[in-house]
Amino acid sequence: MSDVAGRRGYGRTSMPSASVFEVKESQNLSEAMLETRLDNGTRVLSEKIPGVRSAAIGVWIRQGAAHETDADTGMSHLLEHMVFKGTRTRSALEIADSLETLGGSLDAYTSREHTSYQARVLDEHIPVALDVLSDLVLSPTLRDSDLSLEREVVLEEIAQVEDTPDDLVFEIHSERLWNGHPYGRSILGTKLSVEGMKGERLRELHSERDVGENLVIAAAGNVEHEEFVDRVASHVDTVVPGVRSEQVKGPLNAVAGLELVDRETAQTHIVFGAEAPPHSSQDRYALILVSSILGGGMSSRLFQKVREELGLCYSVYTFQSFYRSAGMVGVYVATRP
């Protein structure tokens, strides 16, 4: 809950030159992963996994809660919801049926630094999945008539967090730790901000952010890179490069302290957390390893001591999040007062 939210711009932007089909650069990122960058800035990555007959495909957009203003908080998440209400070629029901009738799945989420739309299908259905994903990202209708309904859905999602202490405690912790920095902003937004969002502003956000420089499209499974690149290029042929979203700035000046919220619940939900290195730091690998030993599973020291030996909880675990400018690491536990 602390990092992502979601469930599952006004169509495509103006036409660039035909050179969007040309490869700007291509490289091997590893033995298995390949990357091609199209002329309009879109990054296309793939990793072929031998022995599978399926594929996972995702579209990532550099737009999340940390890129918003205080007045627009929650807008990225609401936009993610709105694209599922219909596109230029598919109704909401057709979107829902498009992959599930083929035995596949379609989902989406919003985080603090990006929004993602994902599909999982048999390899033979890769063209359909890519068509649906590009339709969602590039051609949503974003009708005002749908906004009034979907706004209520998001308000219910906010209310659900308020009624779920193990979600709420992470919201409270992030807001306190980051002390006014965008990383502490709620992904869902507030009741007040969501109620005040307008369709025109959502369309503006889509037009500004869903551009080539902000798009990363990737696939893993039984996929051929060059074929996948050609398919992606045919879908993003009308996408202009645009302007890349600015990196969220540091330093963050994380603040130590204690935040208490009194609720009539059977358990007390506790998060111990602190600032950690950013995603680019090599230290994150050691931190993940230490976190796994401490509270990463049934064999971890916290689980064995606090739950198995002392019987003080049902749930105890460590967590970590790594962003562009900083990270967060900590421990969660729920126990009777």
Image (spheres, rainbow, N blue to C red):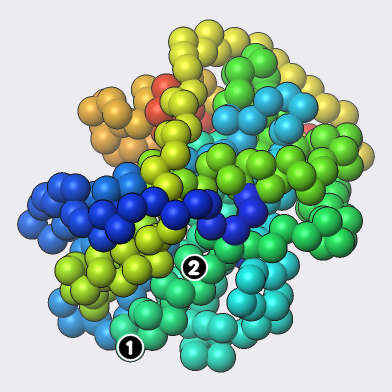
Does residue 121 sit above or below 261 in this rendering?
below
**Picture residue at 37% right of the left edge, 25% below the top:** 278
The Cα–Cα distance between marks 2 and 1, rounded to whole angstroms, is 16 Å
Percent from the top left, x then y, of residue 39?
Answer: 27, 48
Q: Is residue 24 left or right of residue 4?
A: left
Residue 92 appears in the rendering:
yes
The residue type indicated by label 2 comes to Leu
Does residue 170 sit above or below 283 in this rendering?
below
Residue 133: mark: 2
Percent from the top left, x then y, of residue 168?
Answer: 74, 39
Quadrant for the N terminus in the image: top right
> Sequence-wise, which precedes: disc 2 or disc 1?
1
**Picture residue at 88% right of the left edge, 56% below the top:** 148
Residue 249: mark: none
**Picture residue at 48% right of the left edge, 82% below the top:** 104
The residue type indicated by label 1 comes to Glu
Q: Which SS class for mark 2? A: helix
Closer to the camera in the image, 20 or 133? 20
Closer to the camera in the image, 223 or 141? 141
* Mark 1 residue crowding within 10 angstroms, few (<14) / some (14–19) / many (20+): few
Percent from the top left, x then y, of residue 237?
Answer: 38, 61
Count every numbered label the image shows and give the total.
2
Residue that badge 1 annotates: 124
Q: Which SS class for mark 1? A: helix
Residue 137 appears in the rendering:
no
Closer to the camera in the image, 210 or 312? 210
* Mark 2 residue crowding within 10 angstroms, few (<14) / some (14–19) / many (20+): many
